[in-house]
Amino acid sequence: MIQLKVCIGSACHIKGSYNVINVFQQMIEEHQLFEKVELQAVFCLGKCAQAVSVKIDDSEVYSVSGASARGFFEEKILNQ
């Protein structure tokens, strides 16, 4: 199972982490990935200046916005 972690700490919250989470939830539903992707809200991934921080399993920390979340999900999750 893929662990998709989205930071909800202060900086990420202010920059729209819940918008990113909502997009990811929609994508999981659209593609029926409930058994493949576990979406987690986490605190501080250490990249506050580049918020919203997202991590896939033990990957590097990515910077994602509400506007880029759909493309990020398509590239990083659907193409796995």
Image (cartoon, rainbow, N blue to C red):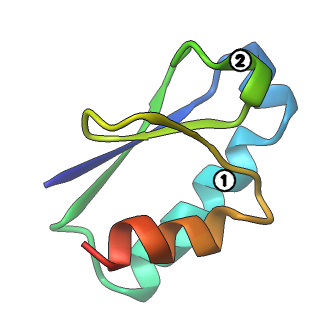
Q: Which amino acid does label 1 sit on?
A: Val
In front of the other: label 2 or label 1? Answer: 2
Counting labels gives 2
Q: Residue at x 36, y 68 (%)?
A: 77
Q: Residue at x 66, y 17 (%)?
A: 9
Mark nearer the N terminus (2 vs 1)? 1
Q: Residue 20 carries which label?
A: 1
Q: Which amino acid is tagged 2?
A: Cys
Lateral position of residue 7 relative to residue 40, left or right: right
Q: What element carries label 2?
A: helix
Give above or below for 62 relative to 2. Answer: above
| The image quarter in which residue 72 lies | bottom right
Quadrant where the image shows the N terminus: bottom left
SS category of the residue bearing label 1? helix
Please identify the quadrant where the C terminus is shown: bottom left
Callout 1 environment at 10 Å: few (<14), some (14 to 19), or many (20+)? Answer: many
Instruction: Tell whether 6 sits left or right of 67.
Output: left
The image position of residue 30, as x and y in percent, is 45, 87
- Position of residue 64 measured from the top left corner of the image (x, y, whole percent): 67, 49
Q: Mark 2 points at which residue?
A: 48
Comparing 42 with 60, the one in front is 60
CA separation in Å, label 2 and label 1: 15 Å
Mark 2 vs 1: CB contact within 8 A: no
Residue farthest along the right direction in this orientation = 14
Residue found at the far front of this picture: 60
Residue 51 coordinates in the image, percent (x, y):
73, 31
